[in-house]
Amino acid sequence: MYHTRYIKSRPYAFTMLLNGERGFTLVQALWQLQLFLFLSIGCVLIFSTAEKARPFEEVNRFSQMEWRQTVLQLDEELSRAAAIRSAQGGKALEYVSDQGRVVTIEPYQEMLRKRMDQAGHLPLLQKVKEFRVRTNQHKAILKVTDESGKVYEAVFFIYKGVVPTS
């Protein structure tokens, strides 16, 4: 009987080649391509999830839409008001509504609120840092500063006149 000590060695698909052999089998190339695609898609999913979480930052900022809505609402109410005046040294706006109720627009904590007859309040605008009011002959000028320091201004024309500041 003839015996030999030669053992045929085959490289396996999932192991690196030994003994200085260079090159890959097709299965190794496909395996590495699959690993690369898996990691790439994983990174894309992580970044897209982080991007989707970003809109929640918008909630913590001054809202342009809320500002426009407040200006439109005040424009309508002030056009029907019987009397308008600046109060608290220009830090609040008071007017008598067409129903005879005294309405106050004033800052409270980080918001601008509306109070009727000094009872309760209705939030008008969030994330407000400063609120100033100036009134003269037939107009009222409101200046609102948001938390980032940006100033918004609205001018309201008054048809029934301004009551002098007390």
Image (cartoon, rainbow, N blue to C red):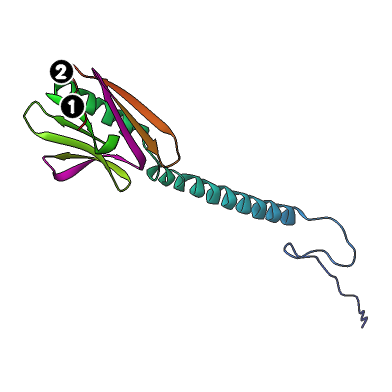
- Label whose residue precedes the other's in the sequence (2 or 1): 1
Classify 14 as above or below 62.
Answer: below
> Which quadrant of the structure image shows residue 114?
top left
- Any mark on residue 84, and which? 1
Q: Residue at x 70, y 55 (%)?
A: 32
- The question of residue 126 being in magenta is answered with yes
Q: Residue furthest bottom?
A: 1
Q: Secondary structure at mark 2?
A: loop
- Image-based side of 30 in relation to 116, left or right: right
Q: Residue at x 19, y 22 (%)?
A: 162
The image shows residue 146 at horizontal and vertical percentages of 39, 38
State the residue position of label 2.
160
The image shows residue 132 at horizontal and vertical percentages of 32, 34
In what quadrant of the picture does the N terminus appear? bottom right
Q: Residue furthest front?
A: 166
Q: Residue at x 19, y 24 (%)?
A: 78
- Magenta span main SS: strand
Q: Residue furthest left?
A: 99
Classify 157 as above or below 93.
Answer: above
- CA gap, disc 2 to disc 1? 9 Å
72 or 36: nearer the eye?
Answer: 72
Name the amino acid, label 2: Lys
The image shows residue 84 at horizontal and vertical percentages of 18, 27
The image shows residue 43 at horizontal and vertical percentages of 59, 51
Name the amino acid, label 1: Ile
- The question of residue 53 being in magenta is answered with no
Q: Are marks 2 and 1 in contact (CB under 8 Å)?
A: yes
Q: Which residues are magenta?
A: 117-140
Classify mark 2: residues with Cα within 10 Å, few (<14), some (14-19) or many (20+): some
- Any mark on residue 9, and which? none
